Each structure stands twice: as structure tokens, then as C-alpha cells.
Image (cartoon, grey):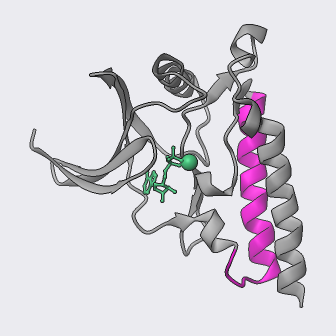
Amino acid sequence: MQSNRKLIMSRHHSDFYEEIIDGISYCLKVSSGWMWVDLDTTLKAYGYYNSLENKEGLVEVLDAWKENEKIYILMEYLKEYKTLRLWLTELHPEEEIEEVFLKIFKTLSSLASQRVLNVDCGDGNWMINDNLDIKMIDLDTMITLSGVEEITNIPRMRSFGLGTLDLILKFNKCRRLNAK
Ligand SMILES: Nc1ncnc2c1ncn2[C@@H]1O[C@H](COP(=O)(O)OP(=O)(O)O)[C@@H](O)[C@H]1O
Ligand SMILES: [Mg+2]
């Protein structure tokens, strides 16, 4: 196996690499944790993710592991995609906006039906391409709905409710702007 790693960008708590393994390009997120969630909780979140049966609308994650007090997440590289946050600043036909948000809400609903929530589901954590394929990234705070104990790990500032409400408000605003 041949592998090489090239830094794409650094953010607050994470570095992103393009990792080419046997000629295929992946995205490697190396996360040093953030104020609300510790590394073990993050790793556990990817364990829940692994156990899902339906991963439609979610970024494909190939591996997640802990090494030297950092979490490594190897996932598909959404190279031709942009963030939904950016997409929403552009003008789009009403049908496209509805199609995109329908996909988002279907993904959230499918997750909930599998008794899982991603508590950080705002517009910065969705990627979209020109074909309107849309995928949720940043699954670091995915939790199960099966136990109260796990729910207490929800970062209060970015609760699932707020993230979803934010998306609904943006949907309506975007429709109004585009109708003008
Ligand atoms: N799999 C991916 N493919 C392409 N770009 C990605 C991928 N994952 C993340 N990114 C880029 O990195 C940014 C931050 O990723 P994210 O996982 O949301 O990090 P953070 O935890 O800092 O919010 C995204 O907005 C996107 O631009
Ligand atoms: Mg994010």
C-alpha cells in the first residue's frame, strides 16, 4: 500500500489532509478535540456512525482512530463540493432549494429513526455539489438516543434542536430572497 499526506487546511481544533492511498484521494481530519467534547466521546460517535444501517446523505467514513492524543478520521474527499453555507449565499431556483432541504431533512429523519442524532447539523456541516448531491460532514458529536447518560454529552450551545431550527429558518429566508 502506498500512501502520502498533504495538508489542505488547518482550523481551530483540526488539520485536514488530502491522503492518497493506492491512487485514491481521501480526506483525513486530524482533530485535537474541542472545549465541549473529549476525544473518547468523539471516537465513540464514530463507533455509533459505524453501526448505522442507512448512511444515505452522510459522508463516507472509512476509518476513525486515536493516536498521540488526537482523533484521525479518514473519509471520502468531497473535492467537487462546497459548503451549504456558501451555496445558500448564491441565487438558486426555488425547486432546487426545496430539493436540497428535502434531502437534508430526509437525512436527519433517517438518523432519528435509527435512534441517532448529530448535534452539530448547521449549514457549515453539509457539503453540496453541482448535481445537488448533499452530504453531512463533521459527525464528531453524533450520539445515540437510547440512553439519557449519553444525551448529557450534548454541547449545549449547538443542540440538535437549534441546528435544525437554524436550517428551517435559512430555508425560509432563502426561498424569500430567491422569490424576489
Ligand atoms: N470530506 C471532506 N471533503 C472535502 N472537504 C471537507 C471534508 N470534510 C471537511 N471538509 C472541509 O473542511 C471544513 C471543516 O470541516 P469540519 O469537519 O466541519 O470541521 P470543524 O470540526 O472544524 O467544523 C468544511 O467546511 C469543508 O470545507
Ligand atoms: Mg464543522
Judge whether 20 appears above or below 160 on screen. Answer: below
- Check if residue 112 falls in the magenta segment: yes
Q: Is residue 171 left or right of residue 7?
A: right
The image quadrant of residue 178 is bottom right
Q: Residue at x 57, y 72 (%)?
A: 131
Residue 155: percent from left, percent from top: 69, 29
Residue 117: percent from left, percent from top: 71, 31
Judge whether 91 appears above or below 155 on screen. Answer: below
The quadrant the N terminus occupies is top left
Residue 60: percent from left, percent from top: 46, 43
Q: Residue furthest bottom?
A: 180
Judge whether 97 appears above or below 9 on screen. Answer: below
Q: Residue at x 52, y 67 (%)?
A: 82
Magenta: predominant secondary structure element? helix
Q: Residue furthest left?
A: 2
Q: Is residue 19 left or right of residue 102?
A: left
Q: Looking at this view, is 24 or 124 the one in front?
A: 124
Residue 170: percent from left, percent from top: 81, 64
The quadrant the C terminus occupies is bottom right
Question: Which region of the structure is painted magenta?
Answer: 89-113
Q: Looking at this view, is 100 or 9 the one in front?
A: 9
The image quadrant of residue 90 is bottom right
Task: Give the number of callouts.
Answer: 0
